[in-house]
Amino acid sequence: MKHTIVLISCLLMTFGCWKGLAQDIPKDTIYLDFNFYKKNCKHLDLLDKLKWKKKEGIQFNFCGKAVFIFPKGNVPDTLCYKHLKDYPITKIENIDSLVQKWQNKTKPLLIKKYGIPYPNTVNKNNMFVTYIIEKFKDYFVLYRVYWRNQRP
């Protein structure tokens, strides 16, 4: 009898884990061009803080419009320019419309999982897998980043 209860408990826990995994809410992937914001930044007080090392990793400041962190210990991808066309660039100014599109797309899944359409959707880390592209003369670097001050 004891073994049966343990077996049933294990099966229920396994089923619960699979059910939770099956209901994961998909994230959209976005790519942001760091060089654009670096080149067009009008805030002179931010120019020396657009990209700088902190104890958590590298912080990217998009001229006061958004701040991202590339965690310490992570390794960026270095790619040649022929692959740049594979990464559609998004602008920070378009994020609000992308948030709305993500909410509309995931609304049925969010209702099924949480019972409400938009729980905790102010956190862009829950909605997007975000990459920063930094261009150099012969190559570009792709950083997988997190929106700063929002839990990853």
Image (cartoon, rainbow, N blue to C red):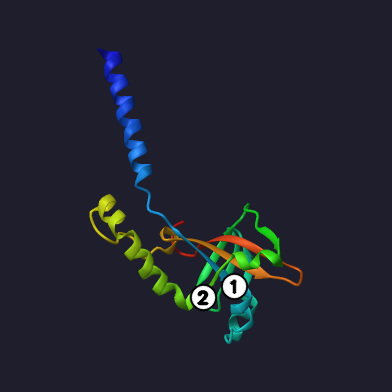
Above or below: residue 63 compared with residue 129: below
Above or below: residue 113 compared with residue 105: above
Would you call the spot at circle 1 few (<14 residues within 10 Å), some (14-19), or many (20 or more)? some
Query: Which of disc 1 and disc 2 is earlier in sequence?
Result: 1
The residue under label 1 is: 33
SS of the residue under disc 2:
loop
Would you call the spot at circle 2 few (<14 residues within 10 Å), some (14-19), or many (20 or more)? few
From where the camera sits, is residue 77 visible?
yes
Horizontal relation, residue 95 to residue 6: left or right? right
Number of marks in the rendered image: 2
Q: Position of residue 110 (x, y in %)?
A: 30, 55
Labels 2 and 1 touching (C-beta < 8 A): yes
At 55% across and 61% down in the image, what residue appears? 145
For the view shown, which residue lies furthest in the right direction?
Answer: 138
**Spatial CA span between label 2 and label 1:** 8 Å
Residue type highlighted by circle 1: Asp
Instruction: Return the residue nearer the eye: 152 or 22.
Output: 22
**Residue 43 position by quadrant:** bottom right
Residue 91: numbered disc: 2
At 23% across and 54% down in the image, what residue appears? 115
**Residue 81 position by quadrant:** bottom right
Q: Position of residue 73 (x, y in %)?
A: 63, 52
Residue 138: numbered disc: none
Above or below: residue 50 compared with residue 151: below
Q: Position of residue 56 (x, y in %)?
A: 58, 58
SS of the residue under disc 1:
strand
Instruction: Return the residue nearer the eye: 86 or 33.
Output: 86
Q: Quadrant of the N terminus?
A: top left
From where the camera sits, is residue 121 visible?
no
At 40% across and 74% down in the image, what residue appears? 96
Q: Position of residue 100 (x, y in %)?
A: 36, 70
Residue type highlighted by circle 2: Lys
